Image (cartoon, rainbow, N blue to C red):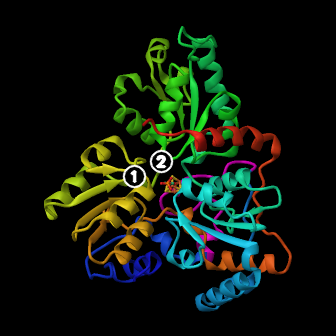
Amino acid sequence: MVSVDQTIQLIRTTGRNAQGQPAEACSPALAKGPWEFDGVLQYGPGSSMSDVIPVGSPRQGALPLEYQRAGVEELHERIRAAKQTLGDRVVVLGHFYQRDEIVQHADFLGDSFQLANAAQTVPNAEAIVFCGVHFMAETADILAQPHQQVILPNLAAGCSMADMADIDSVEECWAQLEALYGTEPDAEGRVPVIPVTYMNSSAALKGFCGRHGGIVCTSSNAETVLEWAFERGQRVLFFPDQHLGRNTAKKMGVPLERMPMWNPRKPLGGNSGDELLDARVVLWHGFCSVHKRFTPEQVAQARAEFPGVRVIVHPECPMAVVDAADEAGSTDYIRKAVAAAVEPTTFAIGTEINMVNRLAAEFPQHTIFCLDPVVCPCSTMYRIHPGYLAWVLEGLVAGETLNRIEVPETVAADARVALERMLDAKPKA
Ligand code: 13P
Ligand code: SF4
């Protein structure tokens, strides 16, 4: 199978993909060597190239030269050897969007919800090496047992969407909403507003939800979580992903005009008091740069070129794309839908390219392609590569915990409350 790395190199040198078709990558900078790619001070080229690391965030220092100079095969060999030495003491978790070079070393592969659970089901592991992005490693640390340490191989692996809502802006929004709504429950005992944060958010925001009667959701349980919230509140403040919030609430019958958007740079988020009083869901102005690339035109083109194509997209895609698709669901939903198809089927998938390519290789009986013809990986997931994995694993062998992600207990205690509410929430029968 041709990996995304190889595809990008091919496009850069020939302008064509592995099938010989004219193709492009979303940023030529993605073709730089991983060391150059990681050397820049911003999150980097590609889908989130204009994001600046928030002040106070941990920064990734230079990877030691011996890992920079090692060839890919040597790195794989060193990773395997370190894992063998560590045995059950270490578990490597990999998100579906990771590169193949990393996925081959993962003990568990999954979506953000499954990996949050996986971290809890490995009590013997002293170290959880999380090959994903920062908010996922934070969540693993919050749910881990006290003797377990969580490691993120490259600290620059953040999530541009998670960075779109910070605790100060959310506290400010909350103060304005409380001033407008008050704090008294209605006749059915429902409080004026319940905060719901997408898993793709900092631990501080999960803690905020824990403190204010709120909850966390992932893309695989957003509807169950909104049901939970509507039972307890007259309305929901949903952050940071406007698209997941809108797509889910719309599916549940909430009219669009009752979903105003909150722009943190404007008073009352850019809304009138009446609009906010009438709201069922107040949507934070956040989005995923990778999923924002998908368009209804791409869906129409896939249908024109492949009559009978089954279009499945992630709910972080804009509403018009979800509406035009046949189905929308989390990364695990997409995987299961492809795996369950009995007849050879053509699938157009609207999610990150590493996952789509892997599905195509794993299920050769189907024709599977990415809705977006431009190759654009999630540039922050992409930052975890074998050099970093070898470095942190060999660190553990030497008795050193590198790149530990540790959420202070003052934040973790509240965040755990919101996460446990999510883990306990069950869909209505
Ligand atoms: P999942 O919850 O489907 O794993 O998605 C996480 C993510 O970051 C999608 O962009
Ligand atoms: Fe964040 Fe989007 Fe990357 Fe998911 S795909 S980790 S939401 S930037």
**Image-based side of 392 in relation to 181, left or right:** right
Ligand 1 neighbours mark 1 (CB distance < 8 Å): yes
Say if mark 2 contacts mark 1, CB within 8 Å. Answer: yes
Q: Mark on residue 314?
A: 1
Q: Main secondary structure of the magenta part?
A: loop
Note whether 189 is above or below 333 in the view shown.
Answer: above
Which amino acid is tagged 2? Ser
Start-end of magenta stretch:
35-56
Note whether 62 is above or below 116 in the view shown.
Answer: below
Q: Quadrant of residue 332?
A: bottom left
Ligand 1 neighbours mark 2 (CB distance < 8 Å): yes
Q: Determine crowd level at label 1: few under 14, some 14-19, many 20+ residues with C-alpha closer than 10 A.
A: many
Question: Residue 377: x, y in percent?
Answer: 46, 65
Q: CA distance from mark 2 to mark 1?
A: 8 Å
Q: Quadrant of residue 168?
A: top right
Residue in the picture at 49% in, 62% down? 378
Q: Determine crowd level at label 2: few under 14, some 14-19, many 20+ residues with C-alpha closer than 10 A.
A: many
Viewer-proximal residue, 322 or 13? 322
* Residue 45 counted in the magenta span: yes
Residue in the picture at 63% in, 76% down? 35
Quick one: SS at disc 1?
loop
Note whether 105 is above or below 114 in the view shown.
Answer: below
Quick one: SS at disc 2?
loop
Residue in the picture at 76% in, 49% down? 56
The numbered mark, 2 or 1, whose residue comes first in the sequence reads: 2
Q: Which residue is mark 2?
A: 219
Viewer-proximal residue, 221 or 306? 221
**Image-based side of 276 in relation to 252, left or right:** right
Question: Residue 232: x, y in percent?
Answer: 55, 23
- The C terminus lies in quadrant: top left
